[in-house]
Amino acid sequence: LGMGGPRGEANTDNRPKVQQAIINNDYSAWAADMTAQVADMRQRASDLEAKINQDTFNKLTQAHQLMQDGKVNEAKIIFDELGMFGPMGHMGGRGMGHSINAPLNATQTTE
């Protein structure tokens, strides 16, 4: 029932709250937890949307080339700075995105 954590993975910390609210038949607690999760998702989406620009694209292409050249640590620094998926599909910093090696329509989850 958890919708997602700050780094895009399943939010296991909030799941017990949501489940407990359902068990307790407590609509107010359930609604509050769900509203908080939606607000978090909106913030993460806004943060990602703000990164849709030429500078981010240039950094991603630079990081991709570094990965191709075997310079994983240098590439990871860029991915961490951007807060986007980087080496081996791991995400650096806070943010959302997809690995540059994954198909654009693929959904990556970590559970």
Image: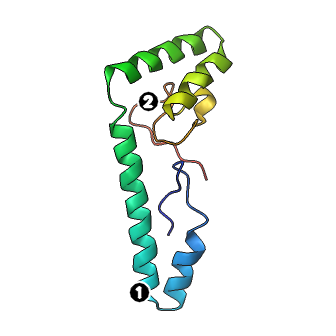
Vertical placement of 7 versus 104: above or below?
below
At 61% from the left edge and 36% from the top edge, which residue is drawn? 90
The three-letter code of the residue at mark 2 reads: Pro
Answer above or below: position of 30 versus 35: below
Q: Amino acid at mark 1?
A: Tyr
- Give the Cα distance between marks 2 and 1: 40 Å
Q: Residue at x 53, y 17 (%)?
A: 63
Q: Is residue 88 shown left or right of residue 8?
A: right
Q: On the picture, is 51 further left or further right than 111?
A: left
Task: State the SS at label 2.
Answer: loop
**For numbered disc 1, what is the local secondary structure?**
helix
Residue 9 located left or right of residue 57: right
Relative to 64, is 8 above or below? below
Q: Residue 87 occupies which quadrant of the picture?
A: top right
Q: Position of residue 69 (x, y in %)?
A: 61, 7
Of residue 98 and residue 46, the one placed in the foreground of this image is: 46
Q: Nearer the viewer, residue 11 or 82?
A: 82
The numbered dot on residue 27 is 1
- The residue carrying pointer 2 sits among few (fewer than 14), some (14 to 19) or many (20 or more) residues within 10 Å by Cα, namely few
Percent x, y of residue 75: 59, 19
Q: Which residue occupies 44% across, 30% down?
A: 103
Residue on which disc 2 sits: 103
